[in-house]
Amino acid sequence: MVNPEKFIEKAIDEIKTAAGSNKVVMALSGGVDSSVCAALAARAIGDNLIPIYIDTGLMRKGETERIQQVFSDIHLDIVHAEDEFLGSLKGICDPEAKRKAVGERFIRVFEREARTQGAKCLLQGTIYPDIIESQGGIKSHHNVGGMPLNMEFTSIIEPVRDLYKDEVRDVAGALGLPKEIQHRMPFPGPGLSVRVIGEVTKEKIAIVREANWIVEDELVEKYRPWQCFAALIGLGTGVKGDNRIHGWIVAVRAVNSRDAMTADPINIPFEHLVRIGSRITADIPSVARVVYDVTAKPPATIEYE
Ligand code: XMP
């Protein structure tokens, strides 16, 4: 376990050295990793840090508005790139190809912003498990193996690359970040695109976003899970009124974990699961079926893709 205070001192020195007098752009998603990086970099290089929030159209319900509120005291560039991301994902069904498409689009949008801002360095909240999983061929994280090789940035700074998630949370506490951020559930870089099996469309994203919001609303405060979410796993038959319909199947996943390398499904009372299922099918008419995922990691992964 790292000593948070010592780590903070060392990380600030490293960022100062790596950035010099250059402007540095970074993606601030509002997750604990990028928020810690932003706090460290703000201390290290002050106004030379340019935090950017990209609305990919793959974010959770209300996320963009929430980030604006939480970071209202720093200047945050909000870039609306929903159509660009959906365009990059068009026709892609393979999970790895999705990650690469989202990763590449991220970098291109950044490069464009960096060019306008005159920044040559990119700062990222990559953490240790992202690196091992990408190197081990498990999956390409959008910020590691998913990154295009021909980037325009002259340097990449990754202050928390040696830390596990729980260590990042300790550092967040030591930096005095709000508890809401310190304990925030991880959310994948490719966003809701990896919570839709197969090709991503605006319609599918809208459905999974609504279902995900219900799942978080029902489970986050009550169970404090490592992660909980909804995924759109396919189409199946259902009955609405007198008609048989072809409707979406939504999977609910809630797991506990220490570092995302392994995970266990959470034992949620059956009545609560039934209530969640009823709420999802009532609020989203195109959903015909809701299932609860009882698989551990391994053999399943946490996300569906
Ligand atoms: P899996 O699904 O591999 O996920 O068991 C382990 C942890 O990683 C998150 N995850 C991602 N994070 N880019 C990310 O930044 C990704 O492509 C990605 N895929 C999965 C996942 O939410 C879990 O916390």
Image (spheres, rainbow, N blue to C red):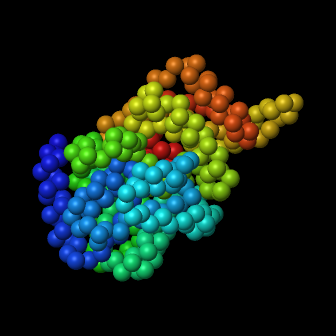
Q: Quarter-wise, where is residue 52 in the image?
A: bottom left
Q: Residue at x 18, y 61 (%)?
A: 12
What residue is at 80 percent from the left and 38 percent from the top? Answer: 245
Which residue occupies 23% across, 49% down?
A: 175
Total labels: the figure holds 0
**Residue 279 image-quadrant placement:** top right
Which residue appears at 31% of the width and 37% of the height?
A: 258
Give the position of the N terminus as an image quadrant.
top left
Residue 281 location, x and y as percent?
Answer: 69, 33
Q: Of 75 and 142, which appears nearest the observer?
A: 75
Does residue 13 appear in this view?
yes
- Image quadrant in which you'd find residue 28: bottom left
* On screen, residue 99 above or below 264: below
Instruction: Relative to 287, say whether 26 is above or below.
Output: below
Task: Give the residue furthest to the right.
Answer: 242
Query: Which residue is more in the foreground, 156 or 7?
Result: 7
**Where in the figure is residue 208, as x and y percent of width and height?**
61, 45
Q: Is residue 287 left or right of residue 105?
A: right
Query: Would residue 83 be found to the left or right of residue 18 on screen?
Result: right
Q: Nearer the viewer, residue 60 or 254?
A: 60
Q: Position of residue 41 (x, y in %)?
A: 26, 62
Q: Is residue 261 visible?
A: no
Image location (x, y in percent) of residue 61 = 56, 47
